[in-house]
Image (cartoon, grey):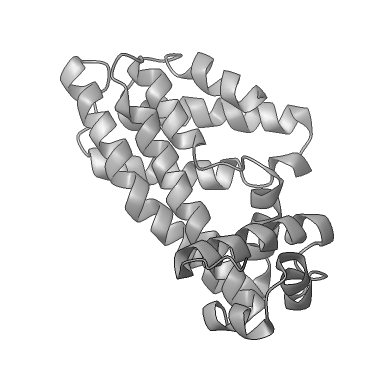
Amino acid sequence: MRVVKTAEERKNEILNVAEQLFVEKGFENASTNDIIARIGIARGTLYHHFKSKEEILDAIVERMTREGIARAKEAVSDKKVPIYERLTAAIMALNIHNDVEAEVFEQIHKPQNALLHRKMEERLLNGVVPIIAELIEEGNESGLFDSKYPKEAAEMILVYSNVAFDELSDHTPEVVARKATAFVHHTERIIGAKEGSLEGTIMKLIKQ
């Protein structure tokens, strides 16, 4: 019996299979023919949803961005968790979590995908800055932080984390440790937190 899927179900199926193939073969070597064969659909069905492999990559990036923002929201939602842990978890929610994200990030860092990289950064900033800013305001109210500009502080922390933790695997453990220590040092000053207050939570997550 032929299974009829909704447009959204089919699109997600295509994206899921494309992610698998990009990890297995790399983006450059995986083709739309591979995707079609793995799913068992007609070429017209794929091109009804996506016009090219690059458009599929764009959709994967969009989905990853939504998931990163959702992780950040979830990280700050439970007020029973100490604010330092929630702030750290929200920042780290945007880091690479699996092989799929690693492959996608490798692609969007290439010169030909500079626009896609920029779009992803803008979407993440627009989605996560308000979340971090609200958390900083909560810290202000509790006396743990002293930040006069929560929104701008959130922007600085996120941009800094993107630069500081980008491609850490290319660095020696000593360089990684120095970058992490510097990030803790400067983040505490950006939000007006007590020295050493973020060190434990951030270092623990980075080591993971």
Asked if residue 57 is positioned above or below residue 78 in the image, the reply reads below
In this view, 87 is above or below 124 = above
Q: Residue at x 50, y 18 (%)?
A: 201
User: In the depicted view, which residue is nearer to us: 80 or 166?
Assistant: 80
Task: Give x and y (percent) for residue 22.
Answer: 74, 61
Residue at the extreme left of the image, as rendered? 141
149 vs 39: above or below? above
Q: Residue at x 33, y 55 (%)?
A: 126
Residue 182 located left or right of residue 144: right
Residue 188: name its quadrant.
top left
The N terminus lies in which quarter of the figure?
bottom right
- Residue 48 visible here: yes
Q: Position of residue 131 (x, y in %)?
A: 30, 39
Image x and y of residue 52, in percent: 63, 81
Looking at the rendering, in which quadrant would you find the C terminus?
top right
* Image position, residue 38 (x, y; %): 76, 65
All told, the count of numbered labels is 0
195 relative position to 172: left or right: left
Q: Confirm whether residue 117 shows in the render.
A: no
The residue at 38%/52% (across/down) is 125
Which residue is at the front of the view, 118 or 39? 39
Residue at the farthest front position? 1
Is residue 6 toward the left or the right of residue 28 in the image? Answer: left
Relative height, residue 119 to residue 178 (above, below): below
Left or right: 73 as drawn, with respect to 100: left
Residue placed at 25% from the left, 22% from the top?
A: 139
